[in-house]
Image (spheres, helix red, strand yellow):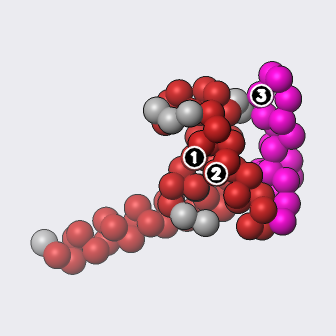
Amino acid sequence: MTEKQALYYRICYEKRNIATAAESLFVSRSVVSRMVSELEKEFGVTFFVRSKKGVTPTKAGDLMYQGICQATKAQEELAKKLKSIKE
């Protein structure tokens, strides 16, 4: 999973809609959809149930979101610590 895939996944999860996520990321719907599909293929699970109304996360989808948020927070904390060492 790349950082870009994680970002697109997180926004899609939070917006609960691929088109809305795409708008906020300034990319096409197909780009967001492809990123999510690639992640589902990589991990061998379905993260969202797709419908005309949007997307609904599965249990695996909820777990992936939690993991991405934890990783993002850990990365931000590490960056702060490294910056404080530099100063």
For badge 1, the amino acid type reads Tyr
Residue occupying the point 78% across, 62% down: 41
- Residue 54 belongs to the span the image colors magenta: yes
User: Where in the figure is residue 62, as x and y percent of width and height?
Assistant: 77, 51
Give the CA distance from mark 2 to mark 1. Answer: 7 Å
Amino acid bearing label 3: Gly
Q: Which amino acid type is shown beneath numbered disc 2? A: Met
The local secondary structure at tag 2 comes to helix
Residue displayed at 39% across by 71% down: 78
The reply to whether discs 1 and 3 touch (Cβ–Cβ < 8 Å) is: no
The reply to whether dot 2 and dot 1 touch (C-beta < 8 Å) is yes
Q: Mark 2 or 1, which is nearer the eye? A: 2
Q: Is residue 72 magenta?
A: no
Residue 17 x %, y %: 70, 30
Nearer the observer: mark 3 or 2; the answer is: 2
Q: Which mark is residue 35?
A: 2
> Circle 3 is placed at which residue position?
54
Residue at label 1? 8
Q: Nearer the viewer, residue 26 or 3?
A: 26
> Element at badge 1?
helix
Q: Earlier in the sequence, mark 3 or mark 2?
A: 2
Q: CA distance from mark 3 to mark 2?
A: 16 Å
Query: Dot 1, crowdedness within 10 Å: few (<14), some or many (≥20)?
Result: many
The segment highlighted magenta reads: 44-64
